[in-house]
Image (cartoon, helix red, strand yellow):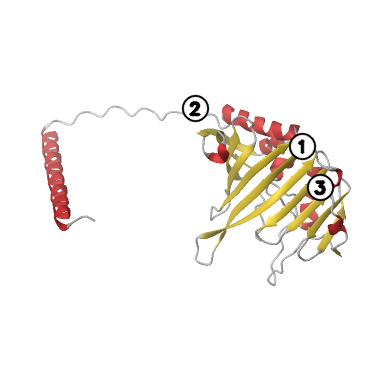
């Protein structure tokens, strides 16, 4: 601990420094007042913005990552999603979910969501899709279109099922990204995230500002942080992607579940919330990059 004498000396030294600085400033100001004012140089015109809205280096990194994902016939990874939601005190709370994802292009997908929140399982085999709640032993089963992309849209339209990592698993990730891209720029490299060197890029697409960490060597995304630009609270959403396996051998029975098939059937439908009198429900539409995760 600092003693009283040390504190006194410190205060004295601080006072002396301030006194000297004040005196020097006054002397300089007095001398400046005696000299005729020099003409100010003409202010140069503001430099035009030379940086392109779409930085080529950032675009190359995004294209490489999207190309790597699109080229994989089979894929497995772990997705940890974190998103903020206002608390009763005002500052946001963070909620998280963890999902184990396996897919086989063009028509097979399995998503096992372990928590937080209620556990759920989603299976799609190119013909049917099943949404299974194992704790409640309830399942919804519906006919499905013949591609993963179309099945994702059908699941959202019919039952409000949405996966925050859908940009990673669609057939052409870069096309979906580029269609709404307004800005993109390169930030630099990180050597501490995910145990590998990653390239950091930021971009604006479909009304979302995203910062992405992408493996410099393997071109696989490791983390995405997003803010919806029309969100007045500027809440942050995070997606961490780990345990990547590309072109792995996937068992033929991986995209179905006998336990789910034998569970109690319920209707494959949207969980519409009860609205106050006179209120209108939101319009049904395509799941998109601007659709935030659902609260658990």
Mark 2 to mark 3 CA distance (whole Å): 43 Å
Mark 2 to mark 1 CA distance (whole Å): 45 Å
**Quarter of the image where the C terminus is located:** bottom right
Task: Answer with left or right where residue 192 lies relative to residue 123.
Answer: left
Above or below, 52 relative to 192: above
Pointer 3 or 1: first along the chain: 3
- Few, some or many residues within 10 Å of mark 3 (<14, 14–19, 20+): many
Residue 125 percent coordinates (x, y): 85, 47
Report the number of numbered marks. 3
Find disc 2 in the rendering and name its residue: 50
Task: Answer with left or right where residue 101 lies relative to residue 185.
Answer: right
Mark 3 to mark 1 CA distance (whole Å): 22 Å
- Few, some or many residues within 10 Å of mark 2 (<14, 14–19, 20+): few
Q: Residue furthest front?
A: 1
Residue 40 percent coordinates (x, y): 25, 29
Task: Answer with left or right where residue 198 lies relative to residue 248.
Answer: left
User: Residue at horizontal 33%, vertical 29%?
Assistant: 43
**Quarter of the image where the N terminus is located:** bottom left
Q: Tell me the number on the disc at residue 151.
A: 3
Residue 123 percent coordinates (x, y): 81, 51
Find disc 1 in the rendering and name its residue: 248
Above or below, 106 relative to 228: above
Pointer 2 or 3: first along the chain: 2
């Amino acid at each position: 601990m600092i003693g009283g004498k040390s504190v006194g000396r410190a205060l004295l030294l601080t006072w002396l420094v301030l006194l000297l600085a004040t005196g020097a400033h006054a002397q300089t100001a007095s001398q400046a007042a005696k000299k005729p004012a020099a003409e100010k140089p003409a202010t140069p015109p503001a430099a035009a913005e030379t940086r392109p809205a779409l930085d080529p280096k950032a675009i190359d990194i995004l294209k490489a990552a999207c190309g790597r994902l699109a080229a994989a016939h089979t894929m497995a990874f772990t997705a940890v999603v974190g998103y903020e939601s206002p608390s009763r005190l005002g500052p946001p709370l963070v909620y998280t979910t963890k999902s184990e994802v396996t897919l086989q292009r063009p028509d097979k997908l399995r998503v096992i969501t372990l928590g937080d929140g209620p556990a759920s399982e989603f299976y799609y085999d190119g013909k049917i899709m099943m949404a299974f709640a194992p704790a409640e032993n309830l399942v919804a089963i519906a006919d499905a279109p013949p591609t993963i992309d179309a099945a994702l849209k059908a699941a959202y339209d019919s039952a409000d099922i949405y996966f925050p990592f859908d940009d990673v698993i669609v057939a052409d990730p870069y096309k979906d990204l580029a269609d709404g891209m307004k800005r993109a720029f390169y930030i630099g490299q990180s050597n501490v995230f995910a145990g590998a060197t990653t390239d950091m890029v930021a971009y604006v697409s479909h009304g979302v500002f995203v910062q992405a960490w992408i493996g410099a060597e393997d071109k696989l995304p490791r983390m995405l942080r997003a803010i919806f630009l029309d969100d007045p609270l500027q809440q942050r959403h995070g997606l961490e992607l780990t345990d990547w396996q590309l072109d792995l051998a996937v068992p033929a029975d991986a995209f179905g579940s006998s336990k789910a098939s034998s569970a109690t059937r319920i209707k494959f439908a949207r969980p519409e919330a009860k609205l106050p009198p006179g209120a209108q429900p939101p319009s049904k539409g395509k799941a998109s990059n601007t659709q935030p995760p659902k609260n658990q």
